[in-house]
Image (spheres, helix red, strand yellow):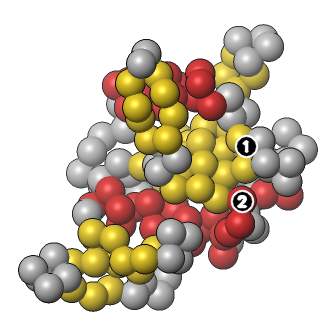
Amino acid sequence: MQALDLPPFEAKLTQSPTNQPLIWDGLRRKHVVLTPEEWVRQHMVHYLTDHLGYPRGLLALERGLRYNQRQKRTDLLALNPDGKPLLLVECKASSVVIDAAVARQATTYNQTIGAPLLLLTNGLVHYCWRVDFAQRTNERLAEIPAFAAAIHL
């Protein structure tokens, strides 16, 4: 577990005509409903890009995948320079405990995606693993790797 206070960022907040809070999503280039999970997702996007050097153009939000004939969506996926999955991020609201059920959900998604790095976060607590599919092992990492390091893992 990595306790990490995500640094503040300049969130662009507004309200919908029905008074729903909205936040500007620079990756999707639109305002989205500001849920507790979306707040964590936007913080993580800014942390990865502004502090760990992940290129914005290699990040995908809510990318679709099929698992057991069901359509699912990933919260955040970072790609490597070749466009292959690098880091799968599962975001939860800060009130949600990162437990075995959350880990199962993320690892299930990652069986389809095949990212060598997996990150679970509720914005307050973060767990990051390196996944070795060939050896069928997971190694817990002490910190979220910067992009430059991640592409060489």
Name the side, left or right, on which 152 lies relative to 37.
right
Q: Is residue 41 left or right of residue 79?
A: left
Q: Nearer the viewer, residue 84 or 92?
A: 84
Q: Is residue 121 left or right of residue 92?
A: right
| Residue occupying the far top of the picture | 135
The picture places residue 39, in percent across and down from the top left corner, at 36, 66
Alpha carbons under labels 1 and 2: distance apart: 10 Å
When asked about the image quadrant of residue 38, the answer is bottom left
Q: Quadrant of the C terminus?
A: top right
- Extreme residue toward the right, this view: 152
Going by the image, does 56 lie left or right of 34? Answer: right
| Mark sitting earlier along the chain (1/2) | 2
The residue lying at 73 percent from left, 18 percent from top is 133
Per the image, the residue denoted by label 2 is 58
Residue linked to disc 1: 86
Task: Give the mark toward the camera: 1 or 2.
Answer: 2
Circle number at residue 126: none
Residue 1 image offset from top left, x and y in percent: 52, 41
As drawn, 133 above or below 121: above
Identify the secondary structure beneath mark 1: strand
- Residue 141 horizontal/vertical position (percent): 67, 38
* Residue at the (49%, 41%) spot, across then down: 64
Q: Amino acid at mark 2?
A: Leu
Place of residue 46 in the rendered image (x, y in percent of width and height, measured from the top left): 56, 72
Q: Secondary structure at mark 2?
A: helix
The outermost residue toward the left is: 18
**Contact? badges 1 and 2 (CB < 8 Å):** yes
Question: Which residue is pictured at 24% across the width and 51% down the height?
Answer: 95
Q: Using the image as rendered, state which of residue 142 and residue 49 is in the foreground.
A: 49
Q: Amino acid at mark 1?
A: Leu
Work out whether residue 119 can be spotted: yes
